[in-house]
Image (cartoon, rainbow, N blue to C red):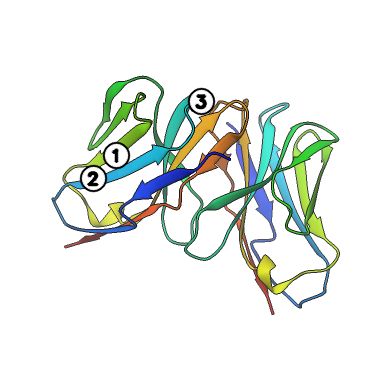
Amino acid sequence: AQTIHQWPVAEIKAVGSPLSLGCTIKGKSSPNLYWYWQATGGTLQQLFYSITVGQVESVVQLNLSASRPKDDQFILSTEKLLLSHSGFYLCAWSLGGSYEQYFGPGTRLTVL
Amino acid sequence: QQKVQQSPESLIVPEGGMASLNCTSSDRNVDYFWWYRQHSGKSPKMLMSIFSNGEKEEGRFTVHLNKASLHTSLHIRDSQPSDSALYLCAAYNYAQGLTFGLGTRVSVFP
């Protein structure tokens, strides 16, 4: 069975500080991977997607970057956090672009 | 840019009642529609998907799709308090991937 983990579960960070969020998928090789951001009470905004190791496509520019250093790992980061970065960050995987996406448990980020 | 419009924004349903949610895509090239349910503080879980014109039923949930009007609807019968959640409609096309609507917040009161 496939499992998806995200870390950390929650973060409270200061404006201007760096950030690194992680996501790991076990039990599935070469999945498509996605990062989403959700403002409190809002919809899901896709940020990045990756079809293969080392390749990441940006969907929305939010002063964030993403990397896929391993087949089963997806990292979201920034060197300088903004207040507007607060929200719920979700990692998801799918077998392909047209397949169902399975979401991880998410990381709740509060920027003060 | 594909847009996915959902209505109503929120819905209050008595326990045992019927909830009807709507979703329309602005993109004629949409291939699939997905319905996700997200309980407060949790991640979204896929509820139902529909690719062809017509109706699909799974338990208390029924999804309709009219591809000509790019409209899908989700109906929840015999609503339960555990159905209280944010319901997200997502439309997929090859060029733009998956686009989510703003959601409909459903509250079921006993």
Give the mark, 1 or 2, whose residue is nearer the N terminus.
2
Above or below for B8 versus A71 = below
For the N terminus of chain B, the quadrant is top right
Q: Identify the secondary structure beneath mark 2.
A: strand
Q: Eyeballing the image, is B91 above or below A47?
A: above
Question: Vertically, is B35 above or below A41?
Answer: above
Residue at image mark 2: B20
What element does badge 1 sit on? strand
Residue type marked 3: Asn
Q: Position of residue B24 (x, y in %)?
A: 38, 39
Q: What subunit carries mark 3? A: B
Q: Establish whether labels 3 and 2 are both on one chain.
A: yes
Residue under pointer 3: B29
The amino acid at mark 1 is Leu
Q: Residue at x 41, y 22 (%)?
A: B51
Q: Nearer the viewer, residue A42 or A89?
A: A42
- The residue shown at (63%, 28%) is B95
**Secondary structure of the residue carrying numbered label 3:** loop
- What percent of the width, then of the height, locates residue B43? 51, 51
Rendered residue at 74%/53% (across/down):
A61
Q: Which residue is mark 1?
A: B74
Q: Quadrant of residue A49?
A: top right
Neighbour class for label 1 at 10 Å: few (<14), some, many (≥20)?
many
Q: Nearer the viewer, residue A11 or B7?
A: B7
CA separation in Å, label 3 and label 2: 25 Å
